[in-house]
Image (cartoon, helix red, strand yellow):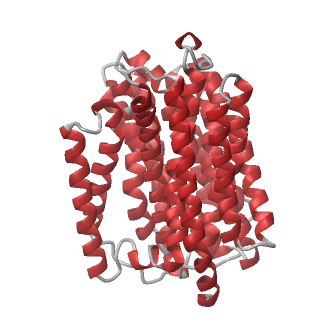
Amino acid sequence: MPPPRRLLLPTLLLLTTVGGIVSSLGASLVPKIAQDLDVSLTSAQWTLTATMITAAVSTPVIGRFAVAHRRRRVILVGLGVVAFGTVLSAVAVEVSALGLPTLIAGRAAQGVGMALAPLAMAVARDVLPAARVGSVMAVLSVGMVAGAGLGYPLTALVAQTGGLAAAFWFGTALTGLTFVLSWWQLPSAPYAVTPRVRTGEALVLGTSTLCLLLGVSQTTAWGWGDARTITLLVVGALGVALWVRVSLAGDNPLVDLRLAFGTPAIGPNLAGLLAGVGMYMGLTLLMVLVQTRSDAGWGLGESVLVAGLLLVPYSVMSVLGSRVSLLVGRFVDPATVLPFGCAIYLLSSVFIAIWHDQVWHAVVAMVLAGIGSGGTFATLPVLLVRVVPVAETSSALAFNQVLRYFGFSVGSAVGVTVLTLASGPVPDEHGFVVASLVNAAVWVLAIVAIVGFSRNSGSRGAQSA
C-alpha cells in the first residue's frame, strides 16, 4: 500500500466527525421539528430514533463487508447515502406535502454516516507506521464525540437563523466535502480474498437490534409494561439468542463472538457498552436540567441554544481528555488508564447530583464529563487493536461501535425513565438526583468490568502480538 497522503489524517478525522454532526441534526432539533411540522414531540423523536437504529443495524454489516479492496468503495458509497439523506430531509422540511415520514426516511439514511467511523480507524491501522497508530486511533475514536459536542450548538444556531432546512443543507455541504476529500485521499488497497457476508445472519442481527432499540427507545412513550414494549424486547432477545447460535456454529461469522467476548476483547467491549449507557444518560439528564423551567421548583430554564452551547466545553474537554490519556498511556498500560476516564465521568455525575442550582454547575459537570468520556473512548480502540488480528480490525471495531450505539439508546431512554419513576408524572429535583446517582452507578459497573477483564486483555494481547 502506498505511503499516506498529506491530507489523509484530516480526511479520516472529518470522516469520524461527520457521524457526530449527523447525530446532532436530531436531538437538538426535535422540538423545532415538532413545531415546524405541527407534530407531537413523541412523533418528532423518531427523527433521532431512526438514525440511531440505522447506525446500530448497519455498522456490523458494513464493518464486515468493508475490508481490503472494498473499504474505499464502501466509504464513498456510505457518504453518498448520507448526502442523499440530508438532501431528502431538507426537501421534506421545505415541501410540506412530504411531511414527517419523508423526513424520518432521510434521517434513517443519515445513520449510515455513524457506521463509517470504524472504517476510518481501520484505514489508519493499515497505512500508518506502527508507532503512530495508537495516537491516531485515540483521536479518531473521540472524533465523533467531539463532532456531536460541536455539532449541537452549530446546527441549533443554523436552524435558528436560517430555518430547519438550512441545518440539513449544512449537513449536505459537510458530507459533500468529506466525500471529495475521501475520494482524493483514501488509498486503494490491493485485492484480497474477503469474507462472505451471510445475508440471513445479517437479517437476524439487524432485526433483533431493531426490535431491542425500538423497545428501549419507546419506553418513554409507551412505558416498560406496555404490551408493545414487552413484545419488541422479547422478540429482540430471542433474535439475539438465535443470532448467537448461528454465529457460533458457522465459519466467518458477521461478528466473531469468540473474539469479541473471549478474554482479550471482553474488557473493551463491556466498557464500550457501559460507557455508552453512562455517557448518554448523563447528557440527557443535563439537557433536562438546563431546559426545565425554573418555576417548576428546580431546573435552569435556559433555551435549546444555550443547552447546545453547554456542549461546547464537553466537546473541547473530550479532545483534551483523549490527548491526556494518550500521553499517560505512553508510560502506563492503557488498561490501567481506562478506569480513570470512567472515574472522572463518575465524578461528574456525583457533582451534578449535589450541585445543580446554577448554570456554572452544569458547565463544571460538562467539563468533567468531557474529560472522562474523551479519556474512555480514546483508550478503547487502542486496547482492541492490540488484541485482535489485523484482518478482523474493521469487524471488531464495528462491533464495539454497535455496543456503544446500543448503550447510547439505552442510556437516553433509561435516564428519562429513572427520572420519571423517581419523580412521578412531573419530573422533580428528587428524581433528577436519583437518576444522576443511578448514572454514577453505571460508571462504577464500567470500572468493575475494566478492572476485572482488561488487565488480562493487555497481557494476552502483548503475547499474541
- Residue 114 placed where, x, y %? 50, 51
- Residue 171 placed where, x, y %? 55, 37
Q: Compare residues 357 and 160 and report the one nearer the observer.
A: 357
How many labels sit on residues? 0
Please indicate whether residue 251 sits to the left or right of residue 419 in the image.
left
Please indicate whether residue 427 sits to the left or right of residue 6 in the image.
left
Name the residue rendered at 58%, 66% in the picture: 450
Q: Compare residues 347 and 234 and report the one nearer the observer.
A: 347
Q: Compare residues 381 and 60 and report the one nearer the observer.
A: 381
View extreme (top): residue: 295
Q: Is residue 214 above or below residue 252?
A: above
Please indicate whether residue 224 sits to the left or right of residue 302 in the image.
left
Is residue 173 visible in the rendered image? The answer is yes
- Residue 370 placed where, x, y %? 68, 45
Q: Is residue 245 above or below residue 292?
A: below
Quarter residue 103 falls in: top left
Name the residue rendered at 60%, 33% in the picture: 152
